Amino acid sequence: MKNRLKALRAENNWTQAQLAAELDVSRQTINAIEKGKFDPSLPLAFRTARLFALPIEDIFDDKPM
């Protein structure tokens, strides 16, 4: 799944570890999502959207990479 997670993280000057801590996941999970190797669970997608104050669709795109 395509996503804007890396760009949004950079806009906030957060490391993968900092974002992971905010979302209560591992840094490896953030890395895998950013690289498109892992799709977030629905609860994680909602937490991410709330954290960035954006609709889920503005962060994650379900079209194939």
Image (tube, grey):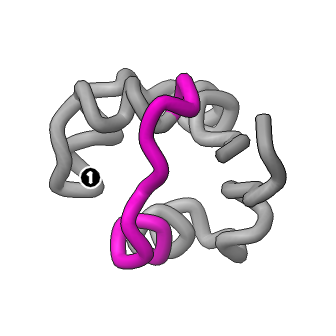
Query: Which residue is the extreme one toward the front?
Result: 64
Instruction: Identify the image quadrant of residue 29.
Output: top left
Say above or below: 14 vs 25: above
Residue at left 47%, top 62%? 48
Q: Nearer the viewer, residue 45 or 9?
A: 45
- Residue 65, image x and y in percent? 78, 34
- What residue is shown with label 1? 22
Say above or below: 57 vs 25: below
- Residue 3, image x and y in percent? 68, 44
Q: Is residue 43 left or right of residue 6?
A: left
Instruction: Identify the image quadrant of residue 52.
Output: bottom right
Q: Is residue 6 left or right of residue 58?
A: left
- Residue 42, image x and y in percent? 43, 75
User: Is 43 inside the magenta-drawn segment?
Assistant: yes
User: Is 7 inside the magenta-drawn segment?
Assistant: no
Residue at left 48%, top 67%? 45
